[in-house]
Amino acid sequence: MYDSIADVKEGTSIACKFKVHTMLDTFGRPPGLSDTPLKGPGDYESLGVIMKRDSEKQLVELEDTKSKRVSLSVGTTAGTLMM
C-alpha cells in the first residue's frame, strides 16, 4: 500500500479506487456512446488502473475498469484517489 502517488515506483502497475464529480446518465454512469438520457452532474466512483501520472500537478490518468475509458484525469488529493 502507498501513502502517496510519489511513493509509486515508475513503471509499476497500480490499481486504485477513485471518485470524480462528472456528468452522469440515468444509470449513474459517465455518458458513453449509447443514447441513454443524461441525468445531470453527480459523483462517480470506480476502480481504475493508473496509466500516466503528473507528479508536479498531482494528477493521474486512469483507465476505468467499468467503462474501459482512459483519459480520465483525477487529482491525487486524499479522498479522491485511494491506492
Image (spheres, rainbow, N blue to C red):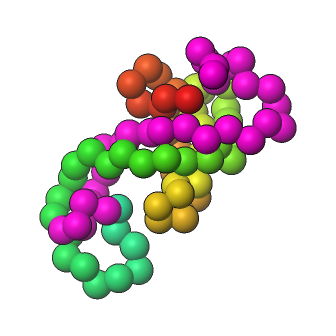
Q: Position of residue 10 (x, y in %)?
A: 82, 31
In reply to whether residue 13 is colored magenta, the answer given is yes
Q: Residue at horizontal 35%, vertical 82%?
A: 34
Left or right: where 70 falls relative to 77: right
Q: Position of residue 23 (x, y in %)?
A: 28, 57
Residue situated in front as seen by the camera: 66 or 51: 66
Q: In the current view of this chain or complex, which residue is farthest to the front?
A: 1
Residue 56 visible somewhere in the drawing: no
Q: Quadrant of residue 15?
A: top right
Q: Position of residue 28 (x, y in %)?
A: 25, 60
Q: Residue at horizontal 69%, vertical 19%?
A: 6
Q: Residue at horizontal 48%, vertical 31%?
A: 81
In reply to whether residue 25 is colored magenta, the answer given is yes
Residue 79 visible somewhere in the drawing: yes
Left or right: where 37 falls relative to 50: left
Q: Which residues are magenta?
A: 1-29
Name above or below for residue 32 compared with residue 47. below
Left or right: where 78 falls relative to 39: right
Left or right: where 79 falls relative to 65: left
- Quadrant in the picture for the C terminus: top right
Q: Quadrant of residue 70?
A: bottom right
Q: Residue at horizontal 63%, vertical 22%?
A: 1
Q: Position of residue 27 (x, y in %)?
A: 22, 67
